[in-house]
Amino acid sequence: MTVLLWIAAFSLLVWAWLACCHGLFWRTDVRLPPRRPPARRPRVAIVVPARDEAAVLPLSLPTLLAQKYPGPARVILVDDHSSDGTGALAAELRTIDGLELTVTTPPPLPPGWTGKLWAVRHGVELAGPDVEYLLLTDADIAHGPDSLAELVAAAESNGLDLVSQMARLRVESGWERLIVPAFVYFFAQLYPFRRSNRPGARTAAAAGGCSLVRREALERAGGVAAIRGAVIDDVSLAKAVKATGGRTWLGLAGEVDSVRPYPRLEQLWRMVSRSAYAQLRHSPLLLLGTVLGLVLMYLVPPVATVAGLVAGAPAVAAAGGAAWAVMAGTYLPMVRYYGQPAPAALLLPFTAGMYLLMTVDSAVQHWRGRGAAWKGRTYSRA
């Protein structure tokens, strides 16, 4: 029990440091910065890469066409060689009084590009040189009517080159309620929003579902081609913009929601595992460190708590229980943000254990040559 006591105590120290000194990653109050209506009305193009999205497009595309933006804006949906009629359906959703909609298909995918980024590049080129801002948003993302106007106002008021919002993911099924809030929590822990938003800080991140980027900043960063092979394209975009002197901002959304359902564990598992090992730069050493870190941070506290109580070792139980309490306390704001009951925060160790298995599975799939598989494509080395 002495060894377990020392490990549990160390876990408690780690959690105390994370809670106080890691960019307040656990807070959910990072929303769009203060803004005022811009004096001018920049031209904007909304670029939507879409591959086999017929199931969700009726819920998302109409919200883009209905944007109440006071300046010139258009929607460009890039049908990435879908097999389910995505392009034809998008054309049918065009409205008379909404934003102008263009449905297009890119040339065949060249080597070295991910399908999504090749589609985005095609949409950016089609937008033309007169566009000042590009809103890159996924086909499963629904926007409130003022979303575009608020994003542009935030960029103009604060001199930002990239404004990104983490869309609120769906939490209706049991698996979604268990896994989705933790997904956003872990992302914020890896890329603390406040630290990412600080000019000059090395941390840079964005959310691919909703990113407004100034065209000049994108071109300065080398354009979409600069990140053409990135599986985690949102973070890569933010890093590229920030590396060339741009100012970036990332926060949680108020009126930007994902409408994609993940009712089964298999779907959520694939969503996480397809890019988890890429996040670790395909490094076995980083994988080992991540596994050990997850065990120390998330699994040791409940194990020490239960073992201490069963063995009659109050010090071990107290150290494990305190670490578990701090862990749950940092998770509670995210649980509430997703409208879940407070006791759900205590389940984070179980969810973290599942993420550990997903990460290992991601590495195994990479070693087998399957890499990041998505929508019928596999990027084994991206």
Image (cartoon, helix red, strand yellow):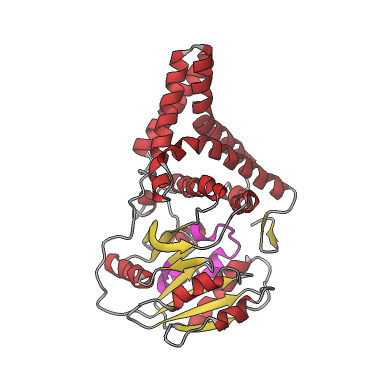
Nearest to the observer: residue 90 or residue 49 = 90
- Residue at position x 43%, y 83% in the image: 98
Task: Residue 202: tell me if it is visible.
Answer: no
Residue 135, relative to residue 377: is it above or below?
below
Taking the image as shown, residue 164 lies to the left or right of residue 280, namely left
Asked if residue 226 lies in the magenta stretch, the reply is: yes
Q: What is the count of numbered marks?
A: 0
Residue 365: x, y in percent?
A: 70, 49
Residue 118 drawn at (x, y percent): 60, 71
Say above or below: 50 vs 207: below
Report the residue that reaches farthest toward the top: 312
The residue lying furthest to the bottom in this view is 96
Where is the C terminus found, in terms of image quarters?
bottom right
| Residue 115, image x, y percentages | 63, 68
Say which of 2 and 218 sits in front: 2
Q: Who's the residue at 55% across and 32% down the image? A: 295
Q: Does the magenta-highlighted stretch encompass residue 51?
A: no
Q: Which residues are magenta?
A: 212-235
Residue at left offset 41%, top offset 60%: 165
Residue 202 vs 324, above or below: the answer is: below
One can see residue 116 in this view? yes
Residue 381: x percent and y percent?
67, 55
For image coordinates 34% across by 73% down, the residue present is: 149
